[in-house]
Amino acid sequence: MKKTAQTSAKSLLVNGWEALKKQQIKHAISLSQQLNQQYPNHSEGWYYTAQVAMIINNKAAAEQGLKNACKLAPTNISLKMILANFCLSNSDFKKAKTLALELDGLLLKAAEHNQLALLFSKLNLVDQAISHYQHAISLDSENHEHYYSLATVLRFAGDLALAEQHLDKAVTLQPLDIDAHVLKVDLRKQTFENNNIDNLSELLAKDLAIKDRVQVYFALAKSYEDLADYQQSFVYLEQGNKLRRKHINYQVQTDKNIMSDIRQIFSPLWWRNHKGHGLSAIKASSTITPIFVLGMPRTGSTLTDRLLSANDNVFSAGELSDFEQQLTAQVNQYRSPRDHSKKSFISAASQVDFRQLGQDYLSSVTAHFGEAVVGDKTTYFIDKLPFNYLYVGLIKAALPQAKIVHVIRNPMDTCYAVYKTLFQQAYPFSYQQQELAAYFISYQKLMQHWAQLADLDIHQLSYEELVGDPKETGKKLYQFCGLEWHDRYIDVTSQQGMVNTASASQVRQEIHQGSLKKWQHYRQQLAPLKAQLEKAGIVCD
């Protein structure tokens, strides 16, 4: 009987996976129900049910299915890893951390150490992440992926020299490890004596995937800029941007419409009716003050973050998606599930319970970082997601005590810095000059709108002023946030901790003015961008 039962369960599973493959969702649900009813002690059946639940966005059923599968197969490391990552993806950081720590002391294979290290990295547990990558290397020393993965964490942690050593090992083991070649270029300024140009040029002659070819173009552009060969740098930059843009499905008009709708819906009248609504509830539940550092990317937000977090009372939480996630959860209660338009989202967002939104946001952040946010010393934390500029009015309605720091930079320096950066997923407007200019113009209009709302209180911090006079600019920033300033804070190189942004390598340097007016090396090449900005009334020089 046992053999027949298992065969029957296996047959149901085969049919179930086939139904999912063909997107026959109703049939897949029916098969999962049969599996769980007839074979409640079958771990693979519960895992299948969890996958079905994820597809139909039933998070509770998905989590329960994974828990049941783990309980029935207590030695299955992969299942526990999947459950931990599921909890993390749904912002249940406490459960994810508990599960990760349960796996921490187990006897694991090299690949499992690698997976667990990645999980610890996502949980900002740097020491554990490094340790498990090292274990993976000790068990599988010929696998280039382990060395690359360890190097990425070391880079974020600030150990750039050791990171480069591991990248050298990765490319020695696998000369076609494009990610490792490219990351080597990002770690430091390239010099005539020590650069990776020959290796990168040789890679272009090979049959590379589009993604890899784009990365090599951008790495060569940076390399030649480091060597002050600006003409050759821009040749590669243009090739990289054109190829990247060709394979992105994006319409800048969509973003322009979104920002226009935000300005219209979150009007001065809306602000008068909603400002301060979150105050009493938030004061009762927390003494923590969020500092939102926002604006266009590549404007100095990471440097600003490092300057603020030099104070022991301030915790750097990085680029968080928590506010948008909590806002989305509330919006979904206010609009029809069939209406997925951007405008309906924006309209519904103006009607949410802002007190609850503020509480949910703080709860989400504290659940993620625990004692780091709610410890004895910490009274502030920094959320430096640039895109939060879309939500400035909503943030102040939900969190009246929040500090808003808008980091600005010369428009052309900003746009060039964005244009020369290959982002992993975000900022699809950045790969074409006309789209980049159009986006920047809409962004400026939106920030001007927020600034005109009475008593919203935005501190505008200039990157040029910050690197030109860090002491005076730092004092003003600290005064705005209600913090005590000390001149030693300008030594940002003395700080430890993870930096998970495109500036992870650069931010380890002393505050300098080397990035000012870089766009002027490319006046001719960037002329279309400049003309479009100036036509909109934006001063570029």
Image (tube, rainbow, N blue to C red):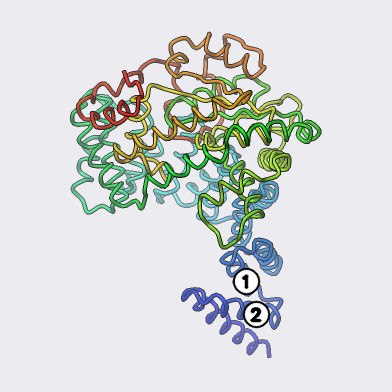
Q: Quadrant of residue 68?
A: bottom right
Residue 528 vs 254, above or below: the answer is: above
| Residue 35's disc number | 2
Query: Looking at the rendering, in which quadrant would you find the N terminus?
Result: bottom right
Q: Earlier in the sequence, mark 2 or mark 1?
A: 2
Q: Quadrant of residue 309?
A: top right
Q: How far across and down, in percent of the image, does residue 13 sit?
A: 57, 79
Looking at the image, which is closer to me, 180 or 273? 273
Residue 271 vs 123, above or below: the answer is: above
Residue 472 vs 38, above or below: the answer is: above
Q: Which residue position holds label 1?
A: 49
- What residue is drawn where x is 73% and y is 24%? 377
Query: Looking at the rendering, in which quadrant would you find the C terminus?
Result: top left
Looking at the image, which is closer to me, 487 or 524? 524
Three-letter code for the amino acid on which mark 1 is drawn: Thr
- What residue is drawn where x is 26% and y is 21%? 520
Query: Position of 94 compared to 440: left or right?
Result: right
Asked whether the viewer can see residue 104, the reply is no
Q: How far across and down, in percent of the image, does residue 393 sit?
A: 60, 34
CA separation in Å, label 2 and label 1? 8 Å
